[in-house]
Image: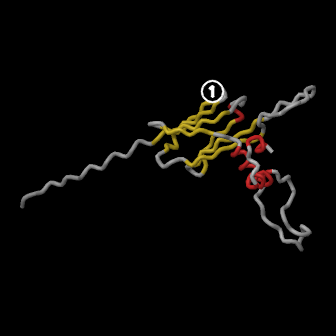
Amino acid sequence: MEGRMFGLETPLMTALQHLLDIPDGESTGGVGGGAGGVEKQGPTRAYVRDARAMAATPADVKELPGAYAFVVDMPGLGSGDIKVQVEDERVLVISGERRREEKEDAKYLRMERRMGKFMRKFVLPENADMDKISAVCRDGVLTVNVDKLPPPEPKKPKTINVQVA
C-alpha cells in the first residue's frame, strides 16, 4: 500500500484501499454467495475505476480576471492520449490513458511511474463561457482555459415622458 510511505496507515485508509483493490468478479458479503445468501451491494467496477483515476490525477484550478485555468501534469502523453470534454452542459472532463511501452528484451526492476487511466471532473461556474474553451499541452503540462462570460450590464432606469393634457 502506498499510504504506508506517507504515514497513512489509519483504519479508514486501510478500508478505502481494500475497496479499491476488489478484483474483477469478486462479490462482497453473502453467505453461500447464491440465492440463499444475502448479497451486499458494493461500489460498481466503473465507480471504483473512476474514483481511482480521479484520485490519482492532481490538478490546479486558477481564477484569472477573464478566465478559469485548469492545469494538470501529463508527462509523456501526446494529444491523442488526452481527451477534454464538456458533459451535462457544465461539467468539464479531462481524461485519457497512459500506457507502458512493452519491450520483449526488457525486464522492469522497479515500476514507480503511474500508468493506466486518469480522469478529473470539474463543475464549471455559471459565468463560464461554454463556447470558448481551449486546451494546450506544452512540456507535459495540460492547461485548459475556460473564458468567462462578460458581466451583465446594469439595467438603466427607463425614463417616461410626462405629457401635460
- Which residue corresponds to the image point at 24% horizontal and 52% vertical from the top-left? 157
Residue 129 percent across, percent down from the top left: 49, 43
State the image coordinates of residue 88 (x, y, percent, origin top left): 59, 52
Residue 25 vs residue 15, the one in the foreground = 15
Which colour assignment does the render follow? secondary structure
Choose between 160 and 118: the one closer to the eye: 118
Compared with residue 39, is residue 1 higher up or lower down, i.e. above or below? Answer: above
Residue assigned mark 1:
138
The C terminus appears in which quarter of the rendering? bottom left
Residue neighbourhood size for the residue with mark 1, other residues' Cα within 10 Å, grouped as few (<14), some (14–19), many (≥20): few
Question: On the rendered image, what quadrant is the N terminus found in?
Answer: top right
Name, please, the residue furthest toward the left: 165
Determine which quarter of the picture holds residue 55: top right
| Residue 124 x/y as whole percent | 54, 47
Is residue 10 placed above or below 102 in the rendered structure?
Answer: below
Q: Nearer the viewer, residue 81 or 1?
A: 1
Q: Could you tell me the amino acid type at mark 1?
A: Arg
Image location of residue 106, percent across then percent down: 90, 27
Name the secondary structure under disc 1.
Answer: strand
Point out the residue furthest to the bottom here: 36
**Residue found at x 59% / y 46%:** 122
Q: Which residue is drawn at 23% across and 53% down?
A: 158
Residue 136 horizontal side relative to residue 44, left or right: left
